[in-house]
């Protein structure tokens, strides 16, 4: 049973981990690979609204996607976009990235190889990965403007979609830990974390929501 306090703390992390940007016209849309095909759906929706002329899907496989997406995350995203009516000519696939940093670096390299000018990126991720993706992109691609986007769903809706409440809280805690430790490791820019968010994170750790934590060294 997950306590009322834990749910309150999870909501605080969920709210903080989103950037609350308003999507607007950008040079390119980049969909970050994951287990969640909803990222592809959101990217397509933004493309169909005319917010960018080109999509890059980036991602190889991870232990959580190997069975579900055997051809690679980016390729499955591409297939989903084609099903939803996006023309092949509007999609580039980067199939090698295995983490957020590689997503950004490899997508940037692909666009540079194609001599595609980029001044702004609409970066699409899972809801709780928005801030991490934004901070990583700002570190690795500082010359472009980064606008974050994700499926505008509530924490409750996301838990319902995953059907594993404890896993969702573990993922929120893991995402928050990276926001705290990765700036010191040079992986992302540093962002101010409110004391209330840090306190919520620490309480959730103390309650054992730690399966997605990484070594801080």
Image (cartoon, helix red, strand yellow):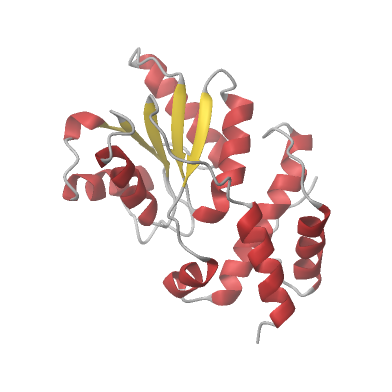
In this view, the residue in front, 49 or 183, is 49
Whether residue 91 can be seen here: yes
Q: Quadrant of residue 124?
A: top left
Q: Which quarter shows the C terminus?
A: top right
Whether residue 211 can be seen here: no
Residue 13, relative to residue 25: is it above or below? Answer: below
Judge left or right: residue 63 versus residue 215: left
Q: Position of residue 111 (x, y in %)?
A: 38, 21
Judge left or right: residue 82 versus residue 109: left
In this view, the residue in front, 45 or 87, is 45
Q: Position of residue 84 (x, y in %)?
A: 19, 49
**Residue at the (34%, 48%) spot, across then down:** 40
Q: Which quarter shows the N terminus?
A: bottom right
Q: How many marks?
A: 0
Q: Position of residue 161 (x, y in %)?
A: 42, 70
In this view, the residue in front, 7 or 114, is 7
Q: Quadrant of residue 134?
A: top right
Q: Residue furthest bottom?
A: 1
**Residue at the (29%, 49%) spot, across then down:** 76
Q: Position of residue 106 (x, y in %)?
A: 46, 28
Residue 130, relative to residue 51: is it above or below? Answer: below
Judge left or right: residue 71 versus residue 105: left
């Amino acid at each position: 049973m997950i306590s009322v306090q834990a749910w309150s703390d999870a909501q605080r992390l969920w709210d903080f981990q989103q950037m609350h940007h308003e999507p607007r016209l950008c040079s390119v849309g980049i969909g970050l690979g994951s287990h969640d095909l909803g990222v592809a759906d959101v990217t397509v929706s933004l493309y169909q609204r005319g917010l960018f002329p080109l999509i890059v899907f980036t991602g190889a496989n991870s232990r959580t996607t190997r069975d579900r997406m055997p051809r690679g995350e980016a390729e499955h995203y591409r297939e989903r976009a084609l099903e939803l009516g996006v023309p092949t000519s509007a999609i580039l696939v980067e199939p090698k990235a295995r983490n957020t940093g590689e997503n950004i670096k490899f997508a940037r390299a692909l666009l540079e190889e194609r001599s595609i000018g980029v001044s702004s990126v609409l970066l699409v991720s899972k809801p709780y990965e928005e801030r991490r993706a934004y901070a990583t992109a700002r570190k690795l691609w500082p010359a472009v403007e980064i606008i974050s986007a994700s499926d505008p769903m509530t924490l409750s809706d996301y838990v319902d979609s995953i059907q594993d409440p404890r896993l969702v809280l573990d993922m929120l805690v893991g995402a928050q830990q990276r926001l705290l430790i990765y700036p010191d490791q040079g992986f992302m820019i540093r962002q101010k974390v409110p004391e209330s968010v840090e306190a919520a994170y620490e309480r959730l750790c103390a309650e054992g929501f730690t399966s997605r934590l990484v070594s801080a060294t």
